[in-house]
Amino acid sequence: MLLNDVKDKKEYRGLSDAFVSRVIKPYTLQYNEYNEKEKKKLIKDARARLRELYGAFLVPGYERRKKYLAIMTKWNDIEKCERILSLHVSSQERLRYYSKLYSKLQSKIHYKTILDLGCGMNVFSRPWMGHVQYYGIDVNKDDVDFCNAYLEKFHLTGGVRWGDLLSFDTFVKTDVCFLFKVLEGLEALERGSTEKLLKKITSPYIVASFATRSIGGGKVISARRLKWFEQLVPGAEKFNLGTEVYYIIKRSS
Ligand SMILES: C[S@@+](CC[C@H](N)C(=O)[O-])C[C@H]1O[C@@H](n2cnc3c(N)ncnc32)[C@H](O)[C@@H]1O
């Protein structure tokens, strides 16, 4: 089966079937999967796209995170949490700003429960989040298991679910929902997915972020590209911190 062929490599095995199928779909229109040569190209292109959408966030030495979790003795061990966060490009770039970010958000939103969509390793920023219940969703099974291992090890309430965000009909209601650096990837996969996703989120506040520099903190990327998003969330409060721009969206209940 094509899906299994594409996933038949260690780095892709943990991705959800729904997500991989979504990525494969356009290539099945471009190539004939029943022709051996074309099928090989299809698999190669689909894997390259998966790497762009997922693999590009991982830093070499990603496996070391398990060692750091094993020697962690308290949930708010900042040094170990920082080491783990620095093994995922997205959280690595935010590392110096976590404290400021959550102080700012807490001054604007009173939250005790968080839903983090496309969470990556963000659960390891719990030391700065304070005492909250944390729920996350991500498409990568290894990451999800690892995040849950941390929550379970320290008996922290909450949990991280494995799944493709575009396949959920609704989401658990929390005080705030984070969408950190995830929406552009979803739009690239399926145009219009942000609008659909926003409608399914039931939390009264959403905080969405976008990179202001290309991956790894490189070139500045134009803020004008986010016009499409700003039109979807008129009146959202916007601020820049580090290499991200954040939008706080208050839903009308
Ligand atoms: C750029 S990273 C951001 C990670 C985290 N939000 C942060 O900013 O630290 C994007 C994350 O979204 C996840 N992701 C991408 N597409 C997804 C989908 N369709 N469903 C669930 N998670 C997805 C990836 O696995 C990755 O962890």
Image: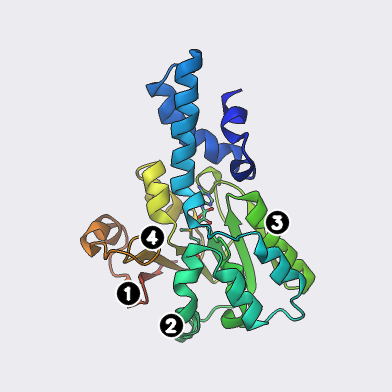
Residue 93 or residue 113, whichever sits in front: 93
Instruction: Identify the mark at residue 237; answer none if there is no mark.
Output: 1
Instruction: Give how far apart the Cα atoms at labels 4 and 2 are.
Output: 28 Å
Tell which circle, 2 or 3, labels the residue nearer the N-terminal end. 2
Amino acid carrying label 3: it is Asp
Question: Residue beneath label 2, please?
Answer: 108
Left or right: residue 241 versus residue 113 is: left
Secondary structure category for the residue under label 3: helix
Question: Residue beneath label 3, please?
Answer: 145
The answer to whether the residue labelled 2 contacts the one labelled 1, judged by CB atoms less than 8 Å apart, is: yes
Mark 2, Cα crowd under 10 Å, few <14 / some 14-19 / many 20+, is few
Residue 170 position, x and y percent, is 55, 51
Amino acid carrying label 4: it is Ile
Tell which circle, 2 or 1, labels the residue nearer the N-terminal end. 2
- 4 or 2: mark nearer the eye: 4
Instruction: Give how far apart the Cα atoms at labels 3 and 1 are.
Output: 34 Å
The image quadrant that residue 15 belongs to is top right
Tell which circle, 4 or 2, labels the residue nearer the N-terminal end. 2
Secondary structure category for the residue under label 1: strand
